[in-house]
Image (tube, rainbow, N blue to C red):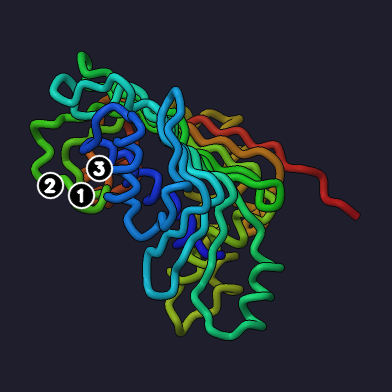
Amino acid sequence: MTFKRLASTALLLCTLTGGGRAMAAPEPQACTALAQGFLKGAISDPGQVHATDRGCLFSDVQIKLGRYQNWTVEQLTIEGLNGWDRKASPLPPHLLVSAKGIRFAAPVENSHLRYQMRLTQRPFDARLDAGFDPATKALSIHELAIESPWIGHIALGIDAVYRAEQDAHAGHDLPDLPALQLSHTRLVLDNKTLFESMLMPTIIALVPAEQDPAEVFPRWQKKTEAQLRELPTRLLDADSREALIRFIRDFPHPTGHFAFDLRFAQPVTLAGLKAGKDHVSFLKDTKITVTYQPQAARP
């Protein structure tokens, strides 16, 4: 399982947010419309579509995101579209998307490989909990999370201001969306195998082919630790600095609980984040808080 699969799962949940914009209140026919629209091809039987008191429930969803990337979702629920006035607000006041029993299913013709994949692919869950205040234009992604008993838990939270009038590039990749201005972001990781299986493949891919990651990463760890020690305490206090250094030292096998909190003094655009090159000067008006509670090594 690679980070691309993690990103694809997040993309699925975020896209459902966008898909909800075209829906009316989730009455039975609206749930069917969603199944025949955004989930077209993923739902083959009307019995897989159910309307609940809060929204829509879909079972045994088959999602194809690419030629070699198929997903199965045992249960997908979308809540928070009831009573949403799209004329009054460009986004729903509260949206909850939950996907349970997600499995990666590469399309293979060999029956032996398919059987082996069923044995080795363990399911995980994902959820998106977001809110929008049309009066203040404040968008809060309370949690975008992926978790399972086998891989652990990772969750991202974002507080931002959404400027619909500036959304001239809606539909582009998220880093190019000028309508979103970030004020606060937080990341929580309780790692079991998630870091190694989902994040490390992408990190390793950043190393040039002619270089050995086993040599590159130790150099990166030493350089990063030295840079962290040079950051001013107004940006990163002593406890947070040591927690982050300990996390870097445990790379690529962090254990226990890790939390990273980044708060901007002034909201910044995603385009500004993408264009930023001088990290120290760029972060001069931010506050970083880090906690890390590694687990003792098992004998």
Residue 195 numbered mark, or none:
none
The kind of secondary structure element at disc 2 is loop
Q: Residues within 10 Å of mark 1 (few under 14, many from 20)?
A: some
Give the image location of residue 127, x and y in percent.
49, 39
Identified at 56% across, 50% down, the residue is 74
The kind of secondary structure element at disc 1 is helix
Real-space Cα distance between discs 1 and 2? 8 Å
Q: Residues within 10 Å of mark 3 (few under 14, many from 20)?
A: some
Q: Is disc 1 in contact with disc 3, using a CB cutoff of under 8 Å?
A: yes
Disc 2 marks which amino acid? His
Upstream in the sequence, badge 3 or badge 2?
2
Query: Which quarter of the picture shows residue 244?
Result: top right
Residue furthest toward the top? 135
Would you say residue 235 is visible in this rendering?
A: no
Disc 3 marks which amino acid? Leu
Asked whether 253 or 167 is in front, the reply is 167
Quadrant housing the N terminus: bottom right
Residue 270 numbered mark, or none:
3
Residue at mark 1 = 176
Upstream in the sequence, badge 1 or badge 2?
2
Asked whether 2 or 206 is in front, the reply is 2
Identified at 16% across, 30% down, the residue is 163
Q: Is disc 1 in contact with disc 2, using a CB cutoff of under 8 Å?
A: yes
User: Closer to the observer: label 1 or label 2?
Assistant: 2
Disc 1 marks which amino acid? Asp
Residue at mark 2 = 169
Q: Residues within 10 Å of mark 2 (few under 14, many from 20)?
A: few
